[in-house]
């Protein structure tokens, strides 16, 4: 496959990589400006010129993947007999600059329950670069016509009609952001129990403080000692509206703050106290 197909394939598989582009050339060089290649930890596609130049690009790109780098970098190469490194010399005589752009894995978000709030949350998140799993035990909630506005966005949407939704939860990757908001409190409890057994998911449960108090007691009785890793109520504090769209906006904003923190980004004017308050959530059923 070519570099463009490789970018799509890595995104589809949820694998990180780096897009390398020759951005400028002076004098003689193996490839022209605009030449591209994609580098993953175990493969490459296309070429930026071979030899020492390409070997250096691959080395740095794979280091960026290992580091989880989020920002692009530029490498400069003088291609003459006086410049050597562990990959040898390249004597074309020109100078080349190569831009390395991380192709980071899109965050994985799973919504269990496509009722009023779940649907509105899916609509919002479908406009972001995420891998969005939509899970419901009721086939009607996942009708393609109902979800047409969701599947039209840039998110990679995967729809699961799952009479046993915990099977989908167990297949999610570590670090996935899970929102439990089904039509059935028994189903909600089952998913919370399964998530705690898995132990590597970020879980938010929709509901009131009273609902969480009941769930918490039952989960403790089941032997879980990490029940407070589940956030309930969920969403940003201070948003009092109970309309499904308002609740969905609150939850989506909380998720964006979490994604910013995990990527090492901060918003101007966001205090530590505000960030900690956001973690607590505020949805009232």
Image: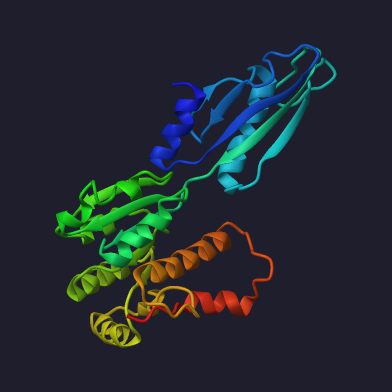
What's the coloring here? rainbow
Q: Residue at x 48, y 68 (%)?
A: 254
Q: Position of residue 243 (x, y in %)?
A: 36, 73
Q: Is residue 237 above or below residue 136?
A: below
Q: Is residue 110 above or below residue 35?
A: below
Q: Is residue 73 above or below residue 208?
A: above
Residue 268 or 63: which is nearer the viewer?
A: 268
Residue 274 or 57: which is nearer the viewer?
A: 274
Q: Residue at x 22, y 53 (%)?
A: 142
Q: Quadrant of residue 47?
A: top right
Q: Residue at x 47, y 77 (%)?
A: 239
27 relative to 271 in the view: left or right: right
Q: Looking at the rendering, in which quadrant would you find the N terminus?
A: top left
Q: Position of residue 233 (x, y in %)?
A: 38, 79
Q: Quadrant of residue 275?
A: bottom right
Q: Residue furthest right?
A: 82
266 relative to 172 in the view: left or right: right
Q: Residue at x 21, y 75 (%)?
A: 185
Residue 198 in sight:
no
Residue 270 in sight:
yes
244 relative to 257 in the view: left or right: left
190 relative to 224 in the view: left or right: left
Q: Looking at the rendering, in which quadrant would you find the C terminus?
A: bottom left
Q: Quadrant of residue 230?
A: bottom left
Q: Position of residue 145 (x, y in %)?
A: 23, 47
Q: How many marks?
A: 0
């Amino acid at each position: 496959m070519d570099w463009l197909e490789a970018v799509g394939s890595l995104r589809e598989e949820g694998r990180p990589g780096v897009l390398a582009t020759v951005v400028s050339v002076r004098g003689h060089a193996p490839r022209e400006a605009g030449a591209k290649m994609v580098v993953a930890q175990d493969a490459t596609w296309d070429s930026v010129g071979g030899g020492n130049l390409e070997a250096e690009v691959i080395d740095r790109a794979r280091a960026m993947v290992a580091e989880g780098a989020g920002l692009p970098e530029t490498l400069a190469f003088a291609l003459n007999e006086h410049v050597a490194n562990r990959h040898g010399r390249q004597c074309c005589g020109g100078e080349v600059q190569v831009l390395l752009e991380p192709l980071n894995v899109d965050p994985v978000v799973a919504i269990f329950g496509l009722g009023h709030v779940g649907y509105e949350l899916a609509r919002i998140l479908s406009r972001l670069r995420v891998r969005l799993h939509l899970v419901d035990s009721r086939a009607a909630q996942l009708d393609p016509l109902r979800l047409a506005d969701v599947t039209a966005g840039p998110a990679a949407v995967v729809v699961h009609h799952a009479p046993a939704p915990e099977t989908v939860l167990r297949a999610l990757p570590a670090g996935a952001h899970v929102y439990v908001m089904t039509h059935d409190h028994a189903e909600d409890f089952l998913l919370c129990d399964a998530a705690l057994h898995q132990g590597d998911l970020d879980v938010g449960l929709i509901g009131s403080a009273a609902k969480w108090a009941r769930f918490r007691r039952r989960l403790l009785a089941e032997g879980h000692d990490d029940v407070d890793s589940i956030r309930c109520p969920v969403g940003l504090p201070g948003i009092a509206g109970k309309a499904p769209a308002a609740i969905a906006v609150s939850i989506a904003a909380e998720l964006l703050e979490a994604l910013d923190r995990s990527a090492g980004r901060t918003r101007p004017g966001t205090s530590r106290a505000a960030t900690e308050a956001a973690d607590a959530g505020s949805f009232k059923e």
